[in-house]
Image (tube, rainbow, N blue to C red):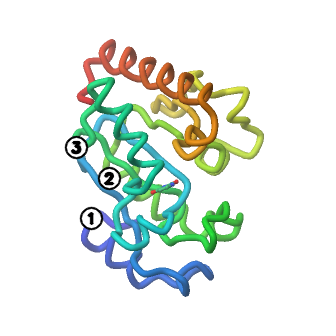
């Protein structure tokens, strides 16, 4: 556990705890407000993110940005990170050992940010954060309170690229996030 961001980021840059380190161009650490009330957690970097070292800058991220703009969610006000910090080959889902190797870094980020609400983007985020028994199809849009944090699972933005209905549901879930944020007077 690191008490400062610089040491945490440095340790990830030097990380070789799993096989994903061999294929990375850059680690994708996280971006946004380090004191955010609301944190978003995705799966892992794609090609664009690997190139730039910033989460959600590719097609899926641009779609999420559009929803943010439409719903007046300021990307600069929230913090965005991923389950794994290095790109899985061919954008495959991170394997269990890879996610486990990386999870302490994410836990450290959550401790430092101390968010009130965490939006879990897709099944990989939901299962690795709340447990394998959870299901994104059954639980998206439903608030889960656990250990003083409000979790809101929703579709991964990449899923929206393939399915119009999911776009509508994602939008609805982010509206729910806005409602919660307004109720609790959170900055978003
Ligand atoms: N998909 C993710 O899960 N995270 C990113 O940063 C980009 C795409």
- Residue furthest right in the image: 133
The residue wearing badge 1 is: 5
Marks 3 and 2: in contact by CB < 8 Å?
A: no
Quadrant assignment for the N terminus: bottom left
Q: Nearer the viewer, residue 172 or 6?
A: 172
Residue in the picture at 22% in, 43% down:
76
Residue in the picture at 23% in, 39% down:
77
- At mark 1, the secondary structure is helix
- At mark 3, the secondary structure is helix
In terms of sequence position, does the residue under pointer 2 or pointer 1 come before the other?
Answer: 1
68 vs 74, left or right, is right
Callout 1: few (<14), some (14-19), or many (20+) C-alpha neighbours within 10 Å? some
Callout 3: few (<14), some (14-19), or many (20+) C-alpha neighbours within 10 Å? few
The residue wearing badge 2 is: 112
Where is residue 51? Give x, y as percent. Answer: 39, 73
Where is residue 153? Give x, y as percent. Answer: 57, 33
88 vs 187, left or right, is right
In terms of sequence position, does the residue under pointer 1 or pointer 3 come before the other?
Answer: 1
Q: Nearer the viewer, residue 186 or 161?
A: 161
Marks 3 and 1: in contact by CB < 8 Å?
A: no
The residue wearing badge 3 is: 76
In terms of sequence position, does the residue under pointer 2 or pointer 3 come before the other?
Answer: 3
66 vs 187, left or right, is right
Residue in the picture at 35% in, 59% down:
30
């Amino acid at each position: 556990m690191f008490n400062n961001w610089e040491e945490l980021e440095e340790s990830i840059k030097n990380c070789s705890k799993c096989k994903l380190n061999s294929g990375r161009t850059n680690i994708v650490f996280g971006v946004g407000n380090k004191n955010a009330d609301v944190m978003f957690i995705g799966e892992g970097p794609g090609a664009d993110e690997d190139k730039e070292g910033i989460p959600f800058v590719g097609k899926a991220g641009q779609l999420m940005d559009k929803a943010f703009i439409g719903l007046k969610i300021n990307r600069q006000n929230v913090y965005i990170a991923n389950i794994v910090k290095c790109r899985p080959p061919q954008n495959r889902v991170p394997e269990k050992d890879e996610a486990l190797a990386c999870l302490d870094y994410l836990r450290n980020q959550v401790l430092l940010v101390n968010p009130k609400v965490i939006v879990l983007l897709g099944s990989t985020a939901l299962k690795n954060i709340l447990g394998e028994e959870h299901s994104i199809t059954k639980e998206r849009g439903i608030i889960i309170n656990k250990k003083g944090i409000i979790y809101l699972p929703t579709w991964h933005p990449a899923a929206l690229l393939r399915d119009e209905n999911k776009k509508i549901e994602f939008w609805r879930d982010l509206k729910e996030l806005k409602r919660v944020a307004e109720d609790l007077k959170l900055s978003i």
